Image (cartoon, grey):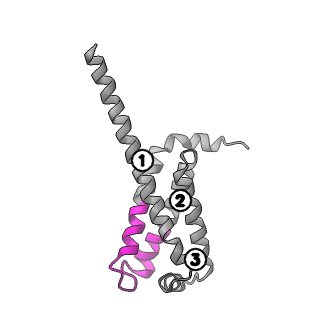
Amino acid sequence: MSRLVRIFALLNDEIMKKTVFIWILKCVAAIILLQTLFFKFTAAPESVYIFSTLNAEPFGRITSGIIELIASILILVPKTTLIGAILGGVTMLGAVFSHLTILGVEVQDDGGTLFILAVITLISCLILIYFYKDNFTKLLQFKM
């Protein structure tokens, strides 16, 4: 009997670790996405510079801010985590691509901080997509 109890305790421990890991990923992605909104919506010089360099100022700056706001909210809601992770992942893929092809890893002497944050968010979103991949079929069957 004690062996069975130990097995259930181990299983419960693994489930708990996975749940905590997933919530850490969600929080990391959402916090990074949310903290950039202030700069985008207030037209901070760094954001204006980045989107001017990409020939997407102000439309790209504001649109990406709205998309990142929506993605961060969706990531935190368990039923919509997959949608948010896909949206956030695609957005960060664009950010990483822009850094590697046009902006450079370091933008205005930031030491590569924006690039690193984009990579961390992209990785977090990709891992969330992996964990929630079974929800993809449910997503396709969604009805109002």
The disc, 1 or 2, on the residue closer to the chain's N-terminal end is 1
Say if mark 3 contacts mark 2, CB within 8 Å.
Answer: no
x, y percent for residue 45: 50, 86
Front-lying residue, 136 or 83: 83
Which residue is farthest right? 144
Q: Is residue 44 a member of the stretch shown in magenta?
A: no
Q: What span is colored magenta in the figure? A: 94-122
x, y percent for residue 58: 61, 82
Q: Is residue 110 a member of the stretch shown in magenta?
A: yes
Q: Which residue is mark 2?
A: 72
Residue 18 visible within the image: yes
Task: Tell me if 126 is positioned left or right of 6 in this view.
Answer: right
The disc, 3 or 2, on the residue closer to the chain's N-terminal end is 3
> Which label sits on residue 41?
3
The alpha-carbon separation of the residues under discs 1 and 2 comes to 14 Å
Q: Which residue is mark 1?
A: 22
Q: Residues within 10 Å of mark 1 (few under 14, many from 20)?
A: some
The alpha-carbon separation of the residues under discs 3 and 2 comes to 16 Å
Q: Where does the C terminus fall, quadrant-wise? A: top right
- Disc 3 residue type (three-letter): Phe
Q: Residue at x 57, y 52 (%)?
A: 83
Q: Residues within 10 Å of mark 3 (few under 14, many from 20)?
A: some
Q: Residue at x 63, y 78 (%)?
A: 59
Q: Residues within 10 Å of mark 2 (few under 14, many from 20)?
A: many
- Disc 2 residue type (three-letter): Ser
> Which label sits on residue 123?
none
